[in-house]
Image: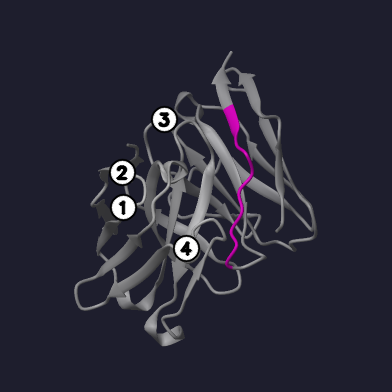
Amino acid sequence: EVQLVESGGGLVKPGRSLRLSCTASGFTFGDYAMSWFRQAPGKGLEWVGFIRSKTNGGTTEYAASVKGRFTISRDDSKSIAYLQMSSLKTEDTAVYYCTRARGMATIRFDYWGQGTLVTVSS
Amino acid sequence: DIQMTQSPSSLSASVGDRVTITCRASQSISSYLNWYQQKPGKAPNLLIYAASSLQSGVPSRFSGSGSGTDFTLTISSLQPEDFATYYCQQSYSTPQYTFGQGTKLEIK
């Protein structure tokens, strides 16, 4: 059974950093791209960033709203994806979801973690 | 960026009803369109990918259609567990995966 479990969320002050982890199981983690999304309280879904599999270069992409502040990485030996968030702003407050990306041309996000809440507040 | 617009934003329906939700893209996205269902306090769940392909494990009462700029999600006979918020998402402009604003489906 495919499972994604996020951890590391919590309350953090503006300007500080936080690292989220996504621990995967039930599939060959290294074969898949992984992506992070977020959802502010009462709002819709927003794509945050993406990391390709090592086979496809392991490169990353980011939404304009987080580029330069957030970094996605992966440790295939541990089946973990990370989201390093720095210079946090109050508008980064959201539930953060880790997802598995499937497909090449018609990419879709077929498994999601349960989410972890990040609250940025002084 | 490609903008995705869903209609309606909210919808009231009864168990057994046939329901259609529409998603329009600001430019052609071919068939690069996914649909998700989200229940309160839960993560989204993939229903339909590539506009019309049913994700494994999803009931056959869900179907998707469309290409280019106009897409629909149809639930043929609403069940109590279908009351949720539905989102469309484009995967044409990779990796800027934009979503519609959501359609909240409520019990009449």
- Residue A13, labelled with which disc? 2
Quadrant housing residue B1: bottom right
Taking the view exactly as shown, the residue that stands out farthest to the left is A78
* Residue A16 tag number: 1
In the rendered structure, the answer to whether residue B54 lies left or right of residue B19 reads left
* Residue type beneath disc 1: Arg
Q: Which residue is mark 3?
A: B40
Q: Can you see residue A28? A: no
Amino acid bearing label 2: Lys
Residue range (magenta): B95-104
Residue linked to disc 4:
A49
Asked whether the beta carbons under mark 2 and mark 1 sit within 8 Å of each other, the answer is: yes
Of callouts 1 and 4, the N-terminal one: 1
Spatial separation of the CA atoms under disc 2 and disc 1: 6 Å
Q: Residue at x 33, y 44 (%)?
A: A118
Q: Is residue B67 visible?
A: yes
Q: Nearer the viewer, mark 3 or mark 2?
A: 2
* Residue B45 part of the magenta-drawn span: no
What is the x, y in percent for residue A7? 23, 52
